[in-house]
Image (tube, rainbow, N blue to C red):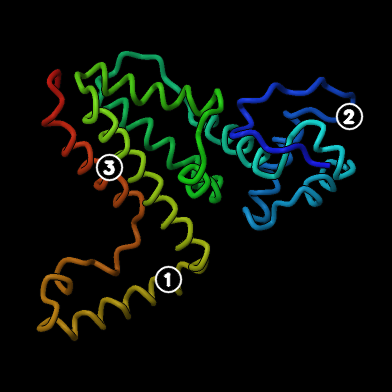
Amino acid sequence: MPRQRPSAVWFADEPARKPRLTRERITTAAVALLDAEGVEGLSMRRLAARLNAGTMSLYEYVGSREDVLDLAVDAAVGEIELDDDQAPWRAALTRHMTRSRRVMRRHPWLPVLMATRPLLGPLALARSERVYALLHGAGLDGPRLTSAVGALTYFVQGFTNAENVWRTRQRDPAAENELRRQAQEYLDRRAELHPTLARHAALDDADFDESFRLGLETVLDGIAPHVPHA
């Protein structure tokens, strides 16, 4: 039977390894299954089938499906490349957040899971340490530091999740452009009711890369006045 789940997989020691399975193999297979089927498609039965193992054998290494998700999230977050250079805080954070978005685009299930579970794995903690250290080194501390980290993190997660959902539903560029054109024309015809939207919403703009760059820049602009060492 499945073991009772601890508060997080990271709080329990890994069981003794057996020849056929390891946590590493289970995690790699889970990430591949999540990429292919999404969170709803990950079950212990499907994961075991991908590993050519019995379902109950998985419970020798993980206590539950939630443990598997924790492991998969940490492995995916670990794909965010870390720098150890001495770049200024703003340039370093821009690079880190841009890389974070790239990884979340590669694994569309990642942004939501990151926002709904404790990120206590060793790879996730290393990335969190990097972000906190950059802002703390620039002079932020206390609630201002945690709020700045939150603003950056939630912007990247929210933006990329919305982008992933949109791209999942709009796979034909020509159809997307036509939809955007129609939406903008619809708004233009209602310019008297919604003049600011009609003029500035730019519904026909499909450049996610530029939108992300400008949005991240705006968040960093909001943090900058509170950074004493800028």
Q: Position of residue 167 (x, y in %)?
A: 48, 61
Instruction: Report the side of 119 relative to 94 (left or right).
Output: right
Answer with mark 2 or mark 3, whichever residue precedes in sequence.
2
| Total numbered badges shown on the rendered structure | 3
Say what amino acid the circle numbered 1 marks: Glu
Q: Is residue 170 above or below residue 187?
A: above
Q: Quadrant of residue 27?
A: top right
Numbered disc in front, either 2 or 3: 2
Question: What is the spatial separation of the Cα atoms under label 1 and label 3, in whole angstroms?
Answer: 24 Å
Q: Is residue 64 above or below residue 22?
A: below
Q: Quadrant of residue 13?
A: top right
Observer-nearest residue: 124 or 220?
A: 124
Say what amino acid the circle numbered 3 marks: Leu
Numbered disc in front, either 1 or 2: 2
Q: Which residue is mark 1?
A: 176
- Quarter of the image where the C terminus is located: top left
Q: Which residue is mark 2?
A: 20
- Quarter of the image where the N terminus is located: top right
Report crowding for label 3: few under 14, some 14 to 19, many 20 or more residues within 10 A (C-alpha).
Answer: many
At 27% from the left and 42% from the top, the residue drawn is 216
Q: Quadrant of residue 187?
A: bottom left
Q: Are marks 2 and 3 in contact (CB under 8 Å)?
A: no
Answer with mark 1 or mark 3, whichever residue precedes in sequence.
1
Instruction: Report the side of 173 relative to 209 (left or right).
Output: right
Q: Which mark is residue 216?
A: 3
Instruction: Report the side of 98 relative to 213 (left or right).
Output: right
Say what amino acid the circle numbered 2 marks: Arg
Q: Position of residue 197 (x, y in %)?
A: 17, 71
